Image: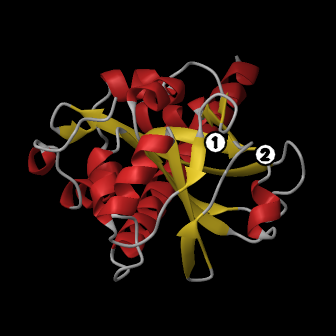
Amino acid sequence: MKILSVLFLSALTAFAAEKKDAVERLDQAAAVYREIMNTPDKGIPQDLVDKANCVVIVPGLKKGAFIVGAQFGKGFATCRKDAAWSAPAAIRVEGGSLGFQIGGQETDAVMLVMNKAGADRLLGNTKFTLGADASVAAGPVGRDAKAATDAGMKAEVLSYSRSRGAFAGISLSGATLRPDMDENAGLYGKRLNTKEVIDTQKPPAAASALLSQLTGTSSREENADRPKTK
C-alpha cells in the first residue's frame, strides 16, 4: 500500500508539472503569434492566415538542434473547426536540418498548414516529416497578396522563424512533428493524440489568449469569396 501511495503521488506530481509547463507554453505561443502579426509590413501575410487550415506555433526551439534526433521543442497545433479554432493540441518538433538553418540558436517557429492534405498529415496518429510526408516551403513575409496566393498554392505547409528579433520564412524540411500525449494529458486530463484533441476537446481556459489572437487576425467569413484551398 505504501508503494502504491508513493507511485500515485509521483504520478500526480508529474501530471501537475506537465500542466504547469503546458499553460506557460500556451502563453508563450500567444505572445509569439501576437508579436509576429503586429510586425508592420514584415509579418505573415494576412491572406495566408485566412486560408490556412491549421496553425502550429512552437516557441523557443532549443540550441543544439543540429544533433540528429535531438528534441527541438514543443508547441501547439490548432485547426479550423466550424467557425472557430479548435482546442490546441500539444506537439513536438524533432530532427531534420533545422539546426543548420538557424545556427543552433533558440528561435520561435510558426507553420501554416494550407490544405486538407497537410491537415490530414498533422492529424495522423503518428509522426510525419516535413518535406517527405508533406511538402513544405519558406513562407513569404509582408503584405504582398500575390506572393501569398502563389505560396499557398505550392506547398502544404508554409514555415516561418524568428530569432533575436529577426523574422523570416524558413524551410523546415526534414523536421518531424509528432503528438505530445504527455502534455495533452496535463491540459485535458488524459493522453490524447492530435486528432483526438482537435476533434473532441473543448479549449481549456489557458488557451483563451492564443485562440483570441488567432480569431482576431483571421476569419473564414471575411474570405468567403476567395478560392477555397483544396
12 vs 59, nearest the viewer: 59
Q: Secondary structure at mark 1?
A: strand
Please report the residue visible at 62 percent of the width from the left and 82 percent of the height from the top.
Answer: 164
Q: Of the residues shown, which amino acid type is indicated by label 1?
A: Arg
Is residue 220 or residue 88 the one in the foreground? 220
Q: Quadrant of the N terminus?
A: top right
Residue 83 in percent (x, y) is at 15, 37
Say the numbered circle drawn on residue 160. Answer: none
With respect to residue 69, does 132 lie above or below? above
Q: CA distance from mark 1 to mark 2?
A: 13 Å
Of tags 1 and 2, which is closer to the observer? 2
According to the picture, the residue beneath numbered tag 2 turns out to be 96
Tell me the amino acid under the disc marked 2: Gly
Report whether residue 192 is seen. no
Give the image location of residue 23, x and y in percent.
45, 53
Q: Residue 58 lies in what quarter of the image?
A: bottom right
Residue 151 at x, y = what percent? 45, 52
Towards the viewer: 174 or 68: 174
The vertical placement of 182 against 24, above or below, is: above
Q: Which residue is depicted at the point 11% across and 42% down? A: 224
Q: So how many labels did they put on this image?
A: 2
Disc 2 element: loop
Image: 81 above or below 213: above
Local crowd at mark 2 within 10 Å, few (<14), some, or many (≥20)? many
Label 1 crowd (10 A; few <14 / some 14-19 / many >=20): some
Closer-to-camera residue (9/86): 86
Residue 188 visible within the image: yes
Residue at 85 percent of width and 61 percent of height:
64
| Residue 38 picture quarter | bottom left
On the rendered structure, is 183 left or right of 86?
Answer: right
Q: Which residue is mark 1?
A: 92
